[in-house]
């Protein structure tokens, strides 16, 4: 009987955790603020709250241990994704994301959603205008569909180009909340297709790089003669 009570309590705790609503709220612009939310609890992550000074304890003097040789840092491998690769993957990823969001049945809530992005026009106004057009098309294509798949009560997105400025100005506030069980639904419905796409992209990348090398072989360096050295 006791074992059944313990099992029932464990199942109730698991269900409570799966149905717990968590989220994050990010504000950026002049200052970056990140707040994590779990039920009624709010925890400020960035900027981190000031820590209380700890009392210093007296330590006994210890002999300096022999210095160990530090291992050489490993080089980080980059995927090498090009903008063309990302654009070609967007339709496939968007299809997978829609399937994942449908499984949540609009339990994901984006509130608030206030974004302002002003692109700089210098030093290449034509490239800035092209980027602005590409971002605008992406936003106004995907936003209506996202509003069908998630709850976004009052979205506000402002896009513009300042041809007299050289830097990008971005500010806004975004809040995302969901139930923990939604992470598993999205992970299976979206993560697995993304992993398959990455594996397929890596297989296609090697023959493409070899073909580029064959088309543009590196010219062998000519040996330097004695006359050129004396000159």
Image (cartoon, helix red, strand yellow):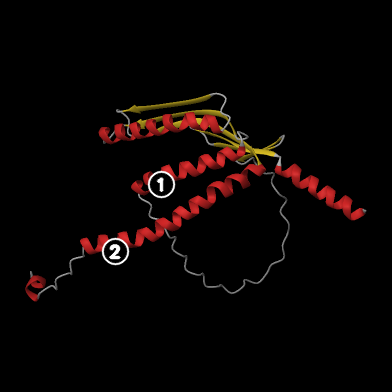
Task: Please state, as top left, top right, bottom left or bottom right, where the C terminus lies in the image.
Answer: bottom left
Q: Residue at x 47, y 68 (%)?
A: 72
190 to the left or right of 64: left
Q: Nearer the viewer, residue 130 or 72?
A: 130
Q: Residue at x 57, y 25 (%)?
A: 153
Q: Nearer the viewer, residue 191 or 213?
A: 191
* Number of residues whose C-alpha sits closer than 10 Å to that of mark 2, classed few (under 14), some (14–19) or many (20 or more): few
Kindly identify which residue carries mark 2: 210
Q: Which sits earlier in the primary sequence, circle 2 or circle 1?
A: 1
Q: What label does residue 89 carry, if any?
A: 1
Q: Nearer the viewer, residue 164 or 12?
A: 12
101 to the left or right of 158: right
Q: Residue at x 80, y 45 (%)?
A: 12
- How far separated are the C-alphas under marks 2 and 1? 22 Å
Q: What label does residue 207 carry, if any?
A: none
49 to the left or right of 31: right
Mark 2: which secondary structure?
Answer: helix
Q: Quadrant of residue 103?
A: top right
189 to the left or right of 141: right
Q: Position of residue 227 (x, y in %)?
A: 6, 73
Query: Is there any visible trace of residue 133 in the rendered image?
Result: yes
């Amino acid at each position: 009987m006791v074992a059944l009570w313990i099992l029932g309590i464990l199942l109730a705790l698991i269900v409570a955790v799966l149905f717990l609503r968590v989220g994050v709220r990010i504000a950026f612009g002049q200052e970056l603020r990140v707040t994590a939310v779990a039920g009624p609890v709010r925890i400020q992550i960035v900027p981190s709250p000031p820590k209380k000074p700890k009392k210093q304890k007296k330590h006994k003097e210890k002999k300096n241990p022999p210095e160990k040789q530090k291992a050489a840092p490993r080089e980080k491998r980059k995927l090498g994704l090009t903008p063309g690769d990302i654009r070609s993957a967007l339709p496939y990823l968007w299809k997978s994301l829609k399937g994942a969001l449908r499984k949540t049945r609009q339990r994901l809530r984006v509130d608030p959603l206030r974004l302002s992005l002003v692109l700089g026009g210098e030093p290449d106004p034509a490239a800035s205008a092209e980027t602005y057009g590409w971002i605008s098309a992406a936003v106004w294509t995907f936003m209506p569909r996202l509003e069908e798949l998630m709850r976004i009560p009052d979205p506000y997105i402002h896009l513009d180009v300042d041809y007299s400025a050289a830097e990008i100005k971005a500010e806004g506030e975004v809040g995302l909340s969901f139930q923990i069980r939604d992470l598993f639904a999205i992970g299976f419905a979206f993560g697995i297709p993304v992993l398959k796409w990455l594996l397929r992209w890596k297989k296609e990348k090697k023959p493409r790089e070899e073909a580029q090398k064959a088309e543009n072989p590196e010219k062998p360096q000519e040996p330097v003669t004695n006359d050129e050295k004396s000159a």
